[in-house]
Amino acid sequence: MKDAKVRLFVEHPLGEGQTIPLERDQAHYLFGVMRLGVGDFVELFNGHDGAWRCEVVQAGKRAGVLACEAQVKPLQMPPDLWLLFAPIKKARTDFIVEKAAEMGAARIMPVQTVFTNSERIRQDRLQAHAVEAAEQCGGTYVPEVTALQKLDRVLADWPEGRQLMFCDEAEVGSSSALSGVFASEAAREGQGAGPWAILIGPEGGFSPEERARLKALPFAHIVSLGPRILRADTAAVAAMTLWQQALGDWR
Amino acid sequence: MKDAKVRLFVEHPLGEGQTIPLERDQAHYLFGVMRLGVGDFVELFNGHDGAWRCEVVQAGKRAGVLACEAQVKPLQMPPDLWLLFAPIKKARTDFIVEKAAEMGAARIMPVQTVFTNSERIRQDRLQAHAVEAAEQCGGTYVPEVTALQKLDRVLADWPEGRQLMFCDEAEVGSSSALSGVFASEAAREGQGAGPWAILIGPEGGFSPEERARLKALPFAHIVSLGPRILRADTAAVAAMTLWQQALGDWR
């Protein structure tokens, strides 16, 4: 049995007996770039039906058809973890989205803080980065990238019961250990972590007013990420690592 | 007292009464790019003497002199942690070096594995990235970037007493939890971790022979980084996070 070397996200349902028509870009990628042809295998996932090994049954320059052969992986939902971050320079914003998808965030939320430089983001482009990261990391789920929202507004509409882990560079070198934050959490008893979010501040840090507001929130937990100041993209991976290991699907 | 907004790594000794002549590039950066002038302050560090608040006493287009005013931070050495990684595409290799410096590696070692694409690296350019990352993260120490060496050779010359944490994508989704790896370590008793290294595999994974050899090493500990396959740069940050939190200076 030949291995499927290429993974592709599709919108189409996947299941026993399903055939999947390809969009033009996907046909170009599979048959033009990757040089696949009829009889080759591709792994497809759509965020709902797990991952399926599919056979190429028609291959053209602008179109093609795949046929589902067997499910190779069930749907694996990430934990209910949101990543909120203040957009930074283009390349690093792209990295944060890619990393969030790899690390297993369920939702990626760009937020505008007082010190955020970006006034807008290309939501469609960031969503495409999340798809590509899911394809590459073997995931069966693609996190949603939401539109840019003001942090104030997001906090005002905060859903009941969702905890917030908030990484503040003003806490660099402080002793607030993660273990303390999580000690009282359900994780200890082997229960699910419940809904959480991680908030990564902008390069310039939070404003004094934002910091005061965040600290006063009953659902917020301040976490220190060591004695050095991390760039936002490094901080996002580090914070998600701590969370996944303590409460998420790395346990 | 005006704050020093710019941090700069210099080779020159720092201390009470020291004056530091600037190199041409540094003078251009401080006075041309950052628009500093006589009377402004800069934070200097050299990897030995901690960080010093220094005053600009001469500023020219191609030269300048700073004078040490006061030590603002003692030297903070990172833990004795090496990061070994197989170089990948240019931008991601740069990122790994930057991240290793931010995360507090003491030494950064590019290694050539069977599936490594790169035959050579620009050691000087990578070292410059490590300097820049140390400047930006508030560190007082710059990790050394070594020349590219063959993994085989590095393992053959492995120093006695140094532990190796080895992150293998073939272990994705396995249950080898980090807590098990570290349970027997001195960290539990509050002692220092001793010398360690982290090895991140290349994009194509390790060869079967490499994997067998690594697994057989008495000083090697296999660690899983969750159920998704992480890119090498993501894996480097995640692995260093786990290590720093369990054994390093994030405790």
Image: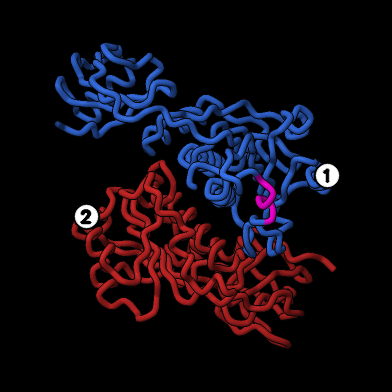
Chain colours: A red, B blue
Residue B147: assigned label: none
Q: Does dot 2 land on a helix, a strand or a loop?
A: loop
Is B68 on the left-hand or right-hand side of B184?
A: left
Is A66 on the left-hand or right-hand side of A217?
A: right
Which residue is tagged 1?
A: B216
Q: Residue at x 78, y 43 (%)?
A: B214
Which residue is tagged 2?
A: A207
Magenta stretch?
B180-185
Q: Position of residue A138 (x, y in %)?
A: 64, 65
Viewer-proximal residue among B21 and B14: B14
Give the alpha-carbon distance from disc 2 to disc 1, as whole Å.
52 Å
Quadrant occupied by the N terminus of chain A: bottom right
Q: Is residue B92 above or below residue B229?
A: above
Q: Chain of mark 2?
A: A
Q: Does dot 1 land on a helix, a strand or a loop?
A: helix
Q: Residue at x 74, y 43 (%)?
A: B220
Of helix, strand and loop, which mostly describes the magenta segment? helix
Viewer-proximal residue among A111 and A145: A111
Q: Residue at x 34, y 53 (%)?
A: A168
Q: Amino acid at mark 1?
A: Ala
> Which residue is at the far front?
B189
Q: Is residue A222 above or below residue A51?
A: above
Residue A14 visible in rendering:
yes
Does the magenta portion include A200? no
Q: Chain of mark 1?
A: B
Residue A132 visible in rendering:
no
Q: Position of residue B106 (x, y in %)?
A: 54, 32
Is A13 on the left-hand or right-hand side of A198?
A: right
Q: Residue at x 29, y 12 (%)?
A: B18
